[in-house]
Image (spheres, rainbow, N blue to C red):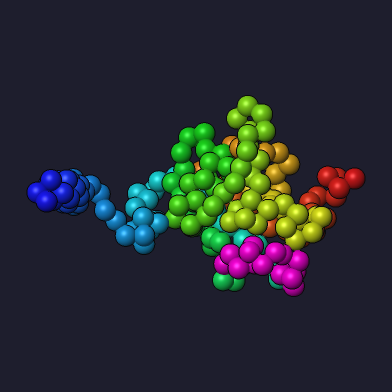
Amino acid sequence: MKKVWIPIAAGYLLLLLAVVGVLLFGHVESVEDHYLFRPEEIPEGADVVTLSIDCRALEGHLDELSPSVRNELPDGLIYLSETRFLYTEGMTAFDLLLKAERPARLRIAYQSVFGNSYYVSSINDLAEFSAGNESGWIVLVNGVFIDRSASSCQLSPGDSVEWRYTVSYGDVLPPELLE
């Protein structure tokens, strides 16, 4: 009978040591703390860029989405209202989107197209063609549609980047791109 208790006691001792080790030396944070974004930590006078992400164009088109995607949509169809981020030299519109992933609780799916160019295929499972043949994500910098990959669009301090979901590219693209 003693032989059975020794391995059990050793297992409990190891578990206790692991818990004590995590509590003493590990960094434990709540889910809310993990995702907390602190814009007030941007130093006064620092170079900043702003980012917003929305899918407001889906109003009136929600029935075209699969139930799983529809259930993931944010209140007001806004994933991130205009938010300031610290600008870093060489930052692209894609880099800024990735910087927002954690604080905005986003799941960004993307793939490398070639070299350092990336294609964002979905944000929180809302993907190109999720709401019809002309739907998908577009990017505007300072209110102007960018006609290249967001990963090749270098930002400057003060720039404003908008990721918008559209149900009809014709509603947002310049006419010369539709010809």
Nearer to me, 177 or 25: 25
Q: Residue furthest right?
A: 179
- Counting from the top left corner in percent of width and height, residue 137 is at 69, 52
Most foreground residue, 57 or 34: 34
Question: Residue 106 in the image: x percent, y percent?
Answer: 52, 55
Q: Which residues are magenta?
A: 60-74
Identify which residue, 128 or 142, lies in the foreground: 128
Q: Is residue 117 visible?
A: yes
Looking at the image, which residue is at 62% across and 55% down? 125
* Image side of residue 158 versus residue 179, left or right: left
Residue beneath the point at 44% across and 55% down: 103
Q: Quadrant of the C terminus?
A: top right
- Quarter location, residue 58: bottom right
Q: Is residue 176 left or right of residue 24?
A: right
Q: Position of residue 84 (x, y in %)?
A: 47, 54
Q: Residue at (48%, 46%) from the top-left corner?
A: 99
> In the displayed image of the protein, which residue is found farthest to the top?
115
Relative to 17, 159 lies left or right? right
Residue situated in front as seen by the camera: 100 or 22:
22
Report x, y in % for residue 66: 70, 64
